[in-house]
Amino acid sequence: MSLLNPEPLPLHVLLLGATGFIGRHVHAALQTRGVQVLRVRRPRGGQGDSAGAWKPMLLHTMREPAAWQAHLQDIDLVINCVGILRQRWGESYEDVHHRMPAALARACALAGVRLIHTSALGLYEGAKSRFLSSKLRGEQAIQASGADHCIVRPSLIDGLGGFGASWLRMLASWPVHFVPRGATGRIAALQAADLGDAFAVLAHMPSFSSQREANLGGDRLFAYRHYLQVLRGVEHTESPVKPAVQVLLPDWVSRAGAHLCDLFRFSPFSYGHWILLQRDNMPMPNALPQLLGRAPLPVTHRRTGLREDFRLS
């Protein structure tokens, strides 16, 4: 490389939520592109291997821009993949989805560091779910922060090792599917590997001035009941299986079940997800094909043992 055309400096990324389902795929995609990644995990009991660069941080306590200042030194980009399905003692939706990202965005604006924030499709004002409303307030705070940011909103994500994805494949394997009658919203499910690749492409953009939002999804639209049949393998080209019998549950049963799952912290089904299932969860427009430079990978049945699938979660 000549002095007139020096080799570009490596990109330094601070990856929040690196041990989660999305974060693991983002990290893998960044690594294949030679990005230097500093991964964040809890000070104690965090998942993840011992190799590589790790930074212990209690993210839900970092609710002021000053708390981030030292951590942004020598960082070009922060990718936030942090989210919680349910609140825990001392760790609220507001802290994780709103106050922490708001402080991070303001700190990034002051430090001149770019920010990619992971949110969700289907957020709207007045949603009767603290899970959803906190995510929306987080988006709004980032948009008002002055940071050079991009908000990524994926549809339903499929892939081995995902808590929700593993549960859906387990449910799909059953001969009878109990489906909420009101789950009529359309889903543009996408592969987690494609999502990671999309993050990596965004990471190399010098600025997000023309890409403040990236709504991402697959090429096909599914109703929830159809999606379960696809995961079951009814469309498998070599050895399709018999479709499951599907029993439609009244909305009051589905809503009560969602509240019980929240109460007992059972399964990925929550009241927030029950709300999302009743509405379309698809990207308009879909930025994924443009970012990848190709069609998204299809969501298909996987010949994988359920025990192995959950072990990866």
Image (cartoon, rainbow, N blue to C red):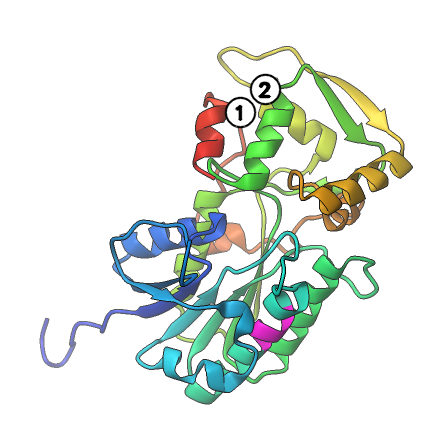
- For the N terminus, the image quarter is bottom left
**Are there few (<14), some (14-19), or many (20+) residues within 10 Å of tag 1?**
some
SS assignment for the magenta stretch, majority = helix
Q: Position of residue 110 (x, y in %)?
A: 47, 89
Q: Which residue is mark 1?
A: 301
Say which residue appears at 59% left-offset and 83% top-offset.
145
Residue 123: in sight, yes or no?
A: no
Residue 64 horizontal side relative to residue 244, left or right: left
Mark with earlier residue (2, 1): 2
Residue 297 horizontal side relative to residue 4, left or right: right
What secondary structure is found at the residue carrying circle 2?
A: loop
- For residue 158, which numbered disc appears in the image? none
Q: Which residue is mark 2?
A: 235
Task: Give the magenta-colored segment's residue range.
Answer: 98-102
Residue 50: in sight, yes or no?
A: yes
Farthest residue, direction left: 2
Q: Position of residue 131 (x, y in %)?
A: 71, 58
Look at the numbered discs 2 and 1 and tell me whether their residues touch, using CB distance below 8 Å: yes
Viewer-proximal residue, 285 or 222?
222
Q: Position of residue 48 (x, y in %)?
A: 36, 50
Work out whether 230 lies above or below 297: above
Front of the two marks 2 and 1: 1
Q: Quadrant of residue 220?
A: top right
Say which residue appears at 52% left-offset and 84% top-offset.
65
Viewer-proximal residue, 208 or 123?
123
Give the residue type that dot 2 points to: Glu
Work out whether 39 lies above or below 186: below
Q: Quadrant of residue 143?
A: bottom right
What secondary structure is found at the residue carrying circle 1?
A: loop
**Magenta includes 303?**
no
